[in-house]
Image (tube, helix red, strand yellow):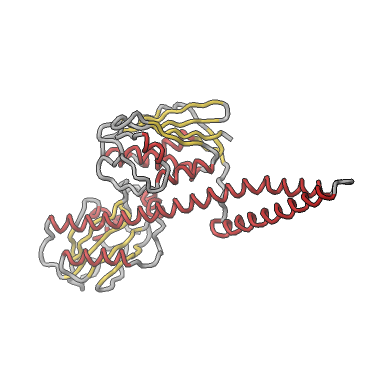
Amino acid sequence: MPENITPINSDSRLEKLLYYEILNSPAENTYDNISWLAAAIFEVENAGICFITNDDIFIKSQVGKKIELSKNDSFLSPEYLKDGSVTRNNIARSDEPDKYIAVPIKSPDYFIIGALYVFGNITAEPTEKQKEMLSKLAELVIDKLETRIAIRQTLTAQDDRLHVLIHDLKNPMTTISLQSELVSRMPNIDEKAGLIASKINLQSKKMVGSLNEILSSAKKVSGSFKPQKNKIDLREVLNAVSQKLAPLANKKNQNFDIKINSALEIFGDDEKITKLFYHILHNSIKFSPENRSITLLHQQEENLITIAVKDEGVGLNDIDLERLFIKFADLSAVPTHGENSNGLGLTAVKMFVDMHKGKIWAESEGKNKGTTFFVQLPIK
């Protein structure tokens, strides 16, 4: 693969692209509408949206003339895309006189995952206004991806939590079934008591059967709904998450102050725990002004580890604290730089914590006095 199409931090960039679960998905009208608007800005008929993997170009939308994009197309090279909007002659196909204009599609943490492009008989250099409009359309693409994956993750987490609860309910129901059967077989048992025990046994068996059917369907959909029980170090998780979010924090001149100097090992699901703290730290960035610190602390007692994430942001009132983990809750707090907030992140966090038999809560002294999130997880 040519060097000019290999972006910096290629592995991390590809990981981010795969995170959106967009590759090889069918075309959607929303993306075609964005492409159409992009073409209209430059008064041409041709535009498209593509995502760039390490080895190929995946076209999500294409209006007007259909073309086959290649990883060798220079106008999609990250060297050009990283600086914003670019006009380039299509040197890869010299028989086509069209000019191409492309802007990067960047994730919130600034990975270039694709491009929004237009091409055609463009005789003049693009104006700053045209570039700005094209960039805004590229932001719409990433906004749609973020909302799409947030909904998917929340629904998946909700299903997983429900299935874990069903699994936990099945165990005592199985015990009730067995114990009632033993009671009904006891010698010299009163006839009425034996009849009651038999009915309990019958109904509990039906309940266990229904629960097994639900769990069987869940496994067919997701393979496994139960959190994995592997040894993970929470300090390593927090360090990794803070590094991933560093570009966002740097944009607002914020910093993470991790006051954890030793390993914090628990048994849990690494993927779900990572997502949990990613959402919390991302939230602290969004709701904190510039030039502030986000402090991470811990406390350990017996079989519990509590992680505290303390920010110096906009804070929460008492009503906010009561509604914090409810889907689409109307809270008084708003992001400090107008960042998007879909109202689902903390809902997913709560579900991940529940799946690990943990607790989560938040404390705040009020408006503009910051917020501290507490995540308490069992070690085993």
Residue at the right extreme of this rendering:
188
Name the residue located 34 percent from the left edge and 34 percent from the top edge: 317
Establish if 314 lies above or below 193.
above
Q: Which quadrant of the rendered structure holds the N terminus?
A: bottom left
Q: Which residue reaches farthest left? A: 124
Percent from the top left, x then y, of residue 358? 52, 37
Describe residue 285's horizontal placement relative to residue 187 as left or right: left
- Depth check, front residue: 284 or 242: 284
Residue 195 appears left or right of 254: right
Residue 261 is left or right of residue 133, and the answer is: right
The quarter of the picture where the C terminus appears is top right
Q: Residue at x 28, y 31 (%)?
A: 368
The total of numbered circles placed on residues is 0
User: Is the residue 21 above or below the residue 110 in the image?
Assistant: below
Instruction: Tell me where residue 187 appears, x and y as whole percent.
Output: 89, 46
Identified at 52% across, 42% down, the residue is 354
Relative image position of residue 309 (x, y in whole percent): 40, 32
Q: Residue at x 41, y 34 (%)?
A: 362
Quadrant of residue 333 within the rendered picture: top left
Residue 141's x, y, as percent?
Answer: 30, 57
Picture quadrant of residue 218: bottom right
Of 321 and 88, nearer the camera is 321
Left of 236 or right of it: where is 216? Answer: right
- Closer to the camera in the image, 268 or 206: 206
| Quadrant in which residue 245 is drawn | top left
